[in-house]
Each structure stands twice: as structure tokens, then as C-alpha cells.
Amino acid sequence: MNYYELTVQLSDFDSWNDIIIAYLAELDFESFQEDSPKIKAYIQESAYHGDMLQDLFHEIEREQHVIESYEVKLIPQQNWNAQWESQFEPVFIGDDIRVVAPFHQLEPFEGIEIMIEPKMSFGTGHHQTTHLMCASMMEMDFHSKRVLDMGSGTGVLAILAEKRGATDIVAIDIEEWSAENCADNALRNCCMHIQSLHGGMEVIPIEKFDVVLANINKNVLTAQIATYSDRMNEGAHLLLSGFFVSDTDELKLLAAGLNLTFMGQHEREGWAVLIFKK
């Protein structure tokens, strides 16, 4: 599978990098690297539409001149892992979690270490939303819990759930290669309680869950949140991320109509995680 790499140079990186990433996510760009003043974004060759990208950038430029330049180039499949290995640094989430790749040579770590081969999947811990979800999960009790991870990507959240004591985890991703990557990473971390499924809402088991994790984008969350609520036990928790702080009021309003009580919110560089209880 080939990917396109988009490199965008911004004149005001601090103010616009998160905004540009959110817009690109709406165009199905899947993973991002931020290195001021540039953003690199990656999208499957089959999902890329140059005219839609140009329309987006023209619309942004009409509001404010912030895009200094951009470049799109095709990355052949055989070069993708080399791209990750050259740019994927270990991720520390507080003092408790370290996310690493198999090629890292590091000192022993006393906390929870998650080893992933990211390939094309989202969820290395570098992005603010993955960081927020992991940090929020460290505040929760997962002992003997049944967990649903929607949009599982690399499987980092599912793996963390098992390492925190969950004994039955269903991880679902709409991309087949992400589901395969999640399953591989689960084995890499000696996790035996993760079932990785390819699909969307239609493959969610009918049995209810104690914790639902969903780090996707706002449009998907608003379309699926009613199903999440339906699959939750009374007293179950729902963690949502993948959106800006400015989107939280809309999601809180939807949740309130689904018997989901708002329990807390955390923020990181303009992104948010919301925690609800049924």
C-alpha cells in the first residue's frame, strides 16, 4: 500500500498547527508529525484527492495567510517502515508509561512499557489525543473489566487496558491493516485478552462493556456515541478524544441526552478528552 506524504510549512505554527491537523483529518489524513514550522501528514494513495486539498488551502488562505508552502510526494510501501524508524522517538506519558518500538535500545523502565510497530496505523503516543487517553486511563480501575476500543489503530490503548488489568478487550478499526497491526502488537506485548476486529459499529459485540475508549474524530464520534451508550453497562465509563477543546460542548450535549453523566475533562495543546459515566 502506497502513501502520500504532505509537508506544510506555516508562518504561525503555534497558532495554526492544531487547526491544520484537524482539517487534514477531515480529509482522511491518518497520521501527523509536528516539527515547527512544518507539519507532515500521511494519507493512503487511494484516499488522496488533490483538488480537495487545494480547496481547503485556498479557503484557509482567504481567512489568513499562514501557509508558506506545501509539497506532496508519494512514498512507496517498501519505504514506509524506514520512514517510521527514522522519525519514531520513544514516548513518555508522565512517569508511568513508555511507548517504544522494537528497534529502540533503551535502559530498563519501571513503569508500563508498550512496544509497538506502528507501520501505517495511528496511535504511537506522540499525538496529544493518544497521550490524553493514556493519561486518563491511568486514573481508572481496569481490573477484570470488559473494554471496547473503537478506532484501535496500533492497539496502544487496548494494550494499556490489559496491562492495567482488563481481562476482555475488543479492539475495532475500520482499516484492515490497522486491525492486523493491533493484533500483532498485542502479541508483541504478550497480551492474551485482546480480540482485534476489522470493521465499524456493525462488528461491535452485543454483550455490554465496562469501559469504552474512542479516540477518533468528532464526526465519527457524534455518529457513533449512541451505539457506545447502548453497549455500556450501568456504571460503565466512556472516554472520548480526537477533537479540539472547542468541540467539547457539542459532545457533552449529545452525551447528556444518552444517559451519560459528564465526569471530567483534560486538555493538552488545544485537544481534549472527555470522560462520562452511564
Image (cartoon, rainbow, N blue to C red):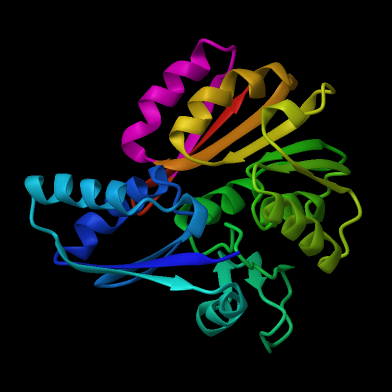
Residue at position x 65%, y 24% in the image: 228
Residue at position x 38%, y 23% in the image: 250
Count of numbered labels shown in the rendering: 0
Specify the segment rendered in magenta. Answer: 244-266
Q: Quadrant of residue 140?
A: top right
Q: Is residue 245 magenta?
A: yes
Where is 165 relative to 150, above or below?
Answer: below
- In the image, taking residue 201 as reference, residue 274 lies left or right, namely left
- On the image, the x and y values in percent for residue 79 come to 57, 80
Residue at position x 82%, y 27% in the image: 205
Q: Quadrant of the N terminus?
A: bottom right
- On the image, the x and y values in percent for residue 95 come to 60, 68
Q: Nearer the viewer, residue 267 or 120?
A: 120
- On the image, the x and y values in percent for residue 243 come to 42, 41
- In the image, taking residue 126 as reference, residue 58 lies left or right, namely left
- In the image, taking residue 146 as reference, residue 39 lies left or right, namely left
Q: Nearer the viewer, residue 142 or 207?
A: 207
Residue at position x 52%, y 30% in the image: 221
Q: Can residue 278 be seen by looking at this rendering?
A: no
- On the image, the x and y values in percent for residue 24 come to 36, 50
Q: Nearer the viewer, residue 63 or 74?
A: 74
